[in-house]
Image (cartoon, grey):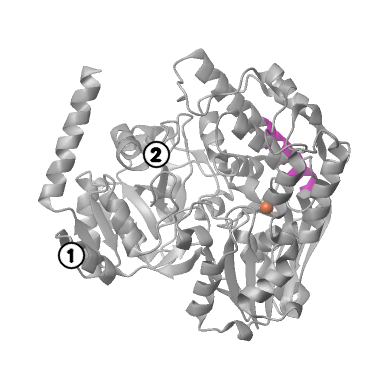
Amino acid sequence: MNILGISAHYHDSAAALVIDGLPVCAVQEERLSRHKGDAVFPQLAIEWCLEHAGLEPDALDAVVFYERPMLKFDRILTCALRAFPHSWRAFPKAMKNSIGEKIWMRGIISSHLGVPGRKVLFTEHHQSHAAAAFFTAPTSGAAILTTDAVGEWATLSVGHGERNANGASAITLLREIRFPHSLGMLYSTFTAYLGFKVNEDEYKVMGLAGFGRPTMVDKVRQLIRRAPDGGFTLDLDYFEYHTTAKRSYSARFVELFGPPRNPYAPIDLENAEGDRFADCAASVQQVLEETLVEITRALRAETGLTDLCLGGGVALNGVANARILADSGFERVFVPPAPGDAGCALGAALYADRIHFGNPDREMPDHSFWGPSVDGNELARLAREDGHIVDQLDDSTLIDRIADDLMAGSIVGWMDGALEFGPRALGHRSILAAPHAMEMRDRLNREIKFREEFRPFAPVVSLEAAERYFELPPGGMRLTRFMSGVFPVRSVWRSRLQAVTHIDGTARVQALERDMAPRLYALLEAYGERSGMPVLLNTSFNLAGEPIVNRAVEGYSTFLRSGINVLVAGQTRVTKRASTKRREEVECLRSVAKSNAG
Ligand SMILES: [Fe+2]
């Protein structure tokens, strides 16, 4: 049975194809269209999936959209009417932003793909999140918590999933919290207040939190009231997102926390204003963690289960995930590689397969590499045309050369096999570097990522060595598989892991199993033989504001426009020709001279 899942029209559109119960491919539209967070109908992603699987659209048994458009329409209409006349100006914009083409989804999908309308199915948004979390996790039964900004009405749901010995499976969502009461919106409101982009920069708030002290926890607690049934409500006097598309926080919010940050002014952590913003981030982070711990503790007691699956965009908060593992009573916590809305494309397809059609459960591949493959020969051709230095090497020679490059302080663009599905670079589209010195972090920020200094870089370490360098609690190893947890770097190693240790002594570590990305694993081993530590800095292969690279040509373009020294795709290694290198050195010397003069 061939089932195509689609998520679209909010942010981060994607398509995923499930054939006979197993994922075959999945990709975010942004990786193909090259527009970050692309929310359009994912035509390119769908076309690639069908082409990759060798299917014509009429071979599809079902196309599943990741939420129910009419329920969403109902929510927006109801909120606008409740807020009338305050909302009358915002209503048309909200309709356009949030609904757009969605309510006509059956017809749109049908006409785009040429499939009959009866083959188009819909899942609820949080069912898609729950399915993406549960059906991809190696567990026979688990509690489920999905938390995001908003789907149709639900913003948080709790329940459980089962796989039975006879192959049948079930997902039961017991309760939900409804818009406008939303942990995702609470966090996003602070994201906006702190001058960052909503739905994109929430991880910057988490990074900034590490620099602050939670001095405003009591103030944040004024915004959220716990309910006796374990739920919560937000005090809506402090928010405006439910009545206007213009601003998410109200004048009362500003009275409580002070003036918002000007998004164009850099955050100076050396002055009181910068400290206030960092404290604000630390405070909302703490309240988010406490609320999630209370909800998951109650869920643990209610279900009696020891495994927990987390879905929804809030599950990208690795600090909160680690806290849930430590304090909820669950023994194992599973977060899929794409817990956000892109992952709903896969979740919707799996939900339809297992629940709607009642197909038997299948053992799922436990990785995120579902996208297009990179072609090393394409890189070689491009680089040769431009006169750069190209080596095509057998695997062991290439790995040795790259380990030597990393030891010599080179920054390496690393492309291998199929693209990751989800926001994390897990070893197939990564920028790699030595993790030891602070200078490397500064160099990456300055020459490649062009980003704020408070954002940490992550380490990748071989699975066997992970506990030597990082304090992983029982069950913590699972969260490191897809970089879903933040854990302390052991204090004795911090001075040798400066570039990947956050200000608060933690790291969002990826512990790599050999089978998951064998070539990166071999590189870690080779680097470990040389440096004594099988640990590398691993950051996503993209420049600020751009999606992660997909094809060789995008990696090559990024390589040319940044300070990446060595580029690898498959068995091709490229370094810049001497004149390019010299020009870079001159520019670097110029900028040093300029900053010294300043
Ligand atoms: Fe969502």
Question: Majority secondary structure of the magenta segment?
Answer: helix
Quick check: 104 above or below 454? below
Amino acid tagged 2: Val
Residue 358 shows up from this direction: no
Boundaries of the magenta span: 287-300
Q: Nearer the viewer, residue 351 or 365?
A: 351
- What is the secondary structure assignment of the residue under circle 2? helix
Quick check: 478 above or below 491? below
Q: Check disc 1 and report the residue beneath it.
A: 385
The answer to whether residue 89 is magenta is: no
Residue contact between numbered discs 2 and 1, judged by CB atoms under 8 Å: no
Figure quadrant of residue 496: top left
Q: Position of residue 138 (x, y in %)?
A: 62, 65
Mark 2 or mark 1, which is nearer to you?
A: 1
Figure quadrant of residue 7: bottom right
Q: Nearer the viewer, residue 495 or 102?
A: 102
Q: Mark 1 or mark 2, which is nearer the start of the sequence? A: 1
Quick check: 592 above or below 353? above
Q: Residue at x 52, y 44 (%)?
A: 472
Q: Position of residue 99 (x, y in %)?
A: 72, 54
Q: Is residue 348 left or right of residue 419?
A: right
- What is the secondary structure assignment of the residue under circle 1? helix
Q: Check disc 2 and report the residue beneath it.
A: 500
Q: Nearer the viewer, residue 83 or 207?
A: 83
The quadrant of the picture occupied by the C terminus is top left
Please rate how many residues cluster around mark 2, counting C-alpha atoms within 10 Å: few if below 14, some from 14 to 19, many from 20: many
The quadrant of the picture occupied by the N terminus is bottom right
Amino acid tagged 1: Glu
Q: Position of residue 571 (x, y in %)?
A: 26, 68
